[in-house]
Amino acid sequence: MSVRFLTWRAPVIGVFTAFMIVPVAATALFSVATRWDRSLWPEGLTLAWWLKVTSRSAFADTLLNSFWVAAVSMLVSLIAVVPAAYLAHTRLPQAKPWLELLSIVPFSLPGVVLALGLIRLYSKLPLPLVNTPNILVAAYVIVTLPFMYRAVMNTLESVDTRSLIEAAQSLGANPLQVLGWVVVPNIAAGIVNGSLLVLSAVFSEFVLANLLIGTRLKTFPIYLVEFTRSDARQASALALMSFVIAWIISLAILWTAARPGRRRQAESPPRSR
Amino acid sequence: MVSGVKRLRFAWIGLAPFLILVLAFEILPILALLVSSLSAKDGPTLSNFGRALTPTTLAAFGNSLQLAIATAFGGTLFGTVVAYAIATSRNSAMRHVMTALANVAANFGGAPLAFAFVITLGSTGFVTILLGCLGIQLYPDFRIYSITGLGIAYLYFQTPLAILLVMPAVAGLRPEWREAAEILGATASQYWRRIALPILAPAISASFFLLFANAFGAYATAWTLTGSDVNLIPVQIAALVRGEVVLDPALADALAILSLLVMALCLIAYQYFARRMRRTA
């Protein structure tokens, strides 16, 4: 019995692992190859492409732009979602189904459609929105809403917030003390998890950045796409960097995912394709 | 009582940032598209939808549906087999590593992924050369810059996503059920058809619909890999946003609303099956 299992399981897992690893490994090798288009193995190894691409000022600029936009989006998302989820869970149960619905809708909103809608709506208004980073941040908060909301709500639901609040109140804590000393520490795992999901989604996002502000604020993925059309070797170094950044954030997410939240988080569809 | 009312009002104020953001950047943009797609100069109309379905956009719908169905089906099928292999493995270290790998890879996509596939399966790619050495010439019959190539690139993130979705259900298949079936004289195929697959059906269906939506709305990978060579719905809409194609706005909006409708139906189906999955799990 176990022998039969082994014989079919090993090839299946082997094929899957190869499918997942080979493109990334090939990118890594390509970025340090002198020439690799006619032989099975690179003809020589060099760090020239890495040095060249990282020494450009645009490299640091776009990387910084991406981190900056990701950090601001994460902050805005925290400010909007955490209090709303907390209040809906503890005080306003009648609002909860609505928040739930509103935070699922972005899943059915392709990036191109959201971009079209935002441009239609705001290009006519005299607001400092279109073609500025503001609208990009706003769009990112919306597309990452499902992740942040689910992550925070899962922890709120898993830690019996109501009894904790009652206990703190009966011990004489004021509302701010309840929030700062009791609620936030108990849902910290969800907040961190949601924040990391927002960071990773925003950092690799291309569609909205490309359609909403184009060249005004160049993010890292836009920089990478430009290179795929001009210089493949330097592009491969950039691609590997974004893989590694995505790995680090994903592993951090796995690490911080609260146990009750983990299953639902796995059900969340990813984004930025 | 008075303080209670006041507190409740205060609570609603706490929801304000969330509601304002959602209204301004989620609800109103969708409504703007909906209104514009349903209106003509002389009042409400449905004719924009009819006019939006030109041969080009119909072909784009055809391609998008084909790509979404093929990668959702292929990803779910392959993902379920791999998930079963992982879940029934007795090596717990391997199980953890594979789950982490699926988690990480499900988040890949867009430009870096498209580029990795050019390096792997392009005309001078590593796997292309490797297969050439083994006597299999991929090119010119296959091109990574085609819809087939795009499908392979999509499977890279579709398969791990399916694994994550199906894994809880597969892990819930108890070995005793199989033993009981065998004791009662069931063959392996009877066990799968009558017991295992019906239990897995909600998870497999949920995975299919989510993967479908995932592929249908995808743009970055397609754009990096094929530019506008492969005619897909998101590519069409993006071209309209950029102003590359001159068309009256109402038609673009009708196209956007149609794709929104497809996505919404998929996600409703996903939610339905995901809920059934939780109930049986």
Image (cartoon, coloured by chain):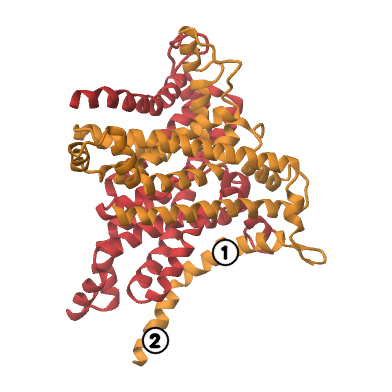
Which residue lies most toward the right here? B42
Badges 1 and 2, same chain: yes
- Residue type of the residue flagged with mark 2: Lys
Q: Residue at position x 28%, y 52% from top?
A: B281
Q: Do residues under tags 1 and 2 come within 8 Å of each other at their CB atoms?
A: no
Q: Residue at position x 44%, y 36% from top?
A: B75
Residue A201: tell me if it is visible.
yes
Q: How many other residues sit within 10 Å of disc 1, few (<14), some (14-19) or many (≥20)?
A: some
In the rendered view, would you say B48 is above or below B184?
Answer: below
Residue A88 location, quadrant: bottom left
Residue A122: tell me if it is visible.
no
Q: Colour of chain A?
A: red
Residue at image mark 1? B27
Q: Secondary structure at mark 1?
A: helix
Which residue is nearer to you in this view: A74 or A96? A96
Residue B176 location, quadrant: top left
Quadrant housing the N terminus of chain B: bottom left
Task: Give the mark nearest the N terminus, 1 or 2.
Answer: 2
Left or right of A56 in this view: A257 = left
Residue A70, how many percent across, how many down?
Answer: 46, 49
In the rendered view, would you say B236 is above or below A260?
Answer: above
Residue B42 location, quadrant: bottom right
Which residue is nearer to you in this view: B87 or A66? B87
Which residue lies most toward the bottom here? B2
Q: How many other residues sit within 10 Å of disc 2, few (<14), some (14-19) or many (≥20)?
A: few
Which residue is nearer to you in this view: B51 or A97? B51
Q: Colour of chain B?
A: orange
Residue at image mark 2? B6
